[in-house]
Image (spheres, rainbow, N blue to C red):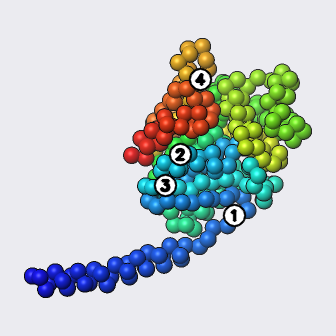
Amino acid sequence: MIRLFASLLATLLVLAPVAVQAQSQAQSQTPAFSSSRIIVETRGRGPDIIFIPGLGSTGSAWRSTADRLDDRYRVHLVTLRGFGETRIGDNVSGGLAGPAASEIERYIREQRIARPALIGHSLGGQIALRVAADMGQGAGGDRIGRVMVVDSSPFFPSLIDARTTSDQVEPLARLGYQALLLFGDQALKSQVAAFGVDMGLAGDMVFQGLGLQGGDRRVLAQGLYEALTVDLRPRLSEITAPVTVVYGWTRDPDAPRNRLEGLYRYGFEGLPRTARFERIEGAEHQVMMQQPQRFLAAVQRFLS
């Protein structure tokens, strides 16, 4: 028996380095990812989480959350080129959210990531929905494990009036596009207000993303235009992954954020399975920064 145990132990000691070497070789065989539209920072080990920032933000918007997760998960922090101080690359033309979603999908395929969790804020939430729809039913299903959208909507203007259409809001979006190019992101909101335009909560959610880290005016203007005009509600039926919606909330009954869940429930009703809604008291649009502990707890529930 002792001889058998010694033989088994010797075998394990011989095979262990081989197994580690094989794992290392498998990782090294994963091709390096390069994109002219997105940048991805990866760290940690374990199940995969892909974080997608909102308008005018970089992957660093998620850093405090990622720092608490990268001992148990492999986190991927996405930045759209042109946000912050990054070079604009090919985002200078040809749209923003659609190409970014396509590049995230290519990243998932090329890096051989199995059923990642997607977490997107604001415009990044819309991009997460695009990825989940693209890699849902039409792609064989189950390519995405789960999705969390943070203070985001499949169609932001529906938070004002569910009957609003993209065509109706397009002139306002074009005005915002031109104003951002003319005045820059820091002055845009006050200029839009000076034009006599009030988009209420939906406008606050879109415009509050601007100026956080800023970026190239061209990519910010395009992102603003798309956030106001793209309606993803017809694509919700293609999302097979479970969806969690996290949003800032207040107890004040007179504040628009107090009534946000009802608006969200209506906007996300096209999902095949009912979304889970988590409100974060004391937060507004930048939920993960304004209430980091409460947001982290919501993420941990989402991942469990």
Q: Quadrant of residue 153?
A: top right
Give percent across and percent down for residue 160: 67, 24
Q: Which residue is mark 4?
A: 257
- Going by the numbered disc 3, the residue's amino acid type is Asp
Marks 1 and 2 sit apart, C-alpha to C-alpha, by: 25 Å
Q: Identify the residue shown where x is 82% and y is 27%.
A: 190
- Name the N-terminal-most of marks 4 and 1: 1
Question: Is residue 136 something that shows in the picture?
Answer: no
Q: Earlier in the sequence, mark 3 or mark 4?
A: 3
- Of mark 1 and mark 3, the one earlier in the sequence is 1
Q: Nearer the viewer, mark 2 or mark 4?
A: 2
In the rendered structure, are the residues bearing label 3 and label 2 in contact, judged by CB atoms less than 8 Å apart? no
Q: Give the position of the N terminus as an image quadrant.
A: bottom left
Q: Nearer the viewer, mark 1 or mark 2?
A: 2
Name which residue type carries label 1: Ser
The numbered mark at residue 2 is: none
Rendered image: mark on residue 70? 3
Residue 173 to residue 143: above or below: above
Residue 194 placement (x, y as % from top left): 86, 23
Query: Which residue does the numbered mark 1 point to in the structure image?
Result: 35
**How far is mark 2 from mark 4, CA to CA?**
23 Å
Q: Label 4 sits on what residue type?
A: Arg
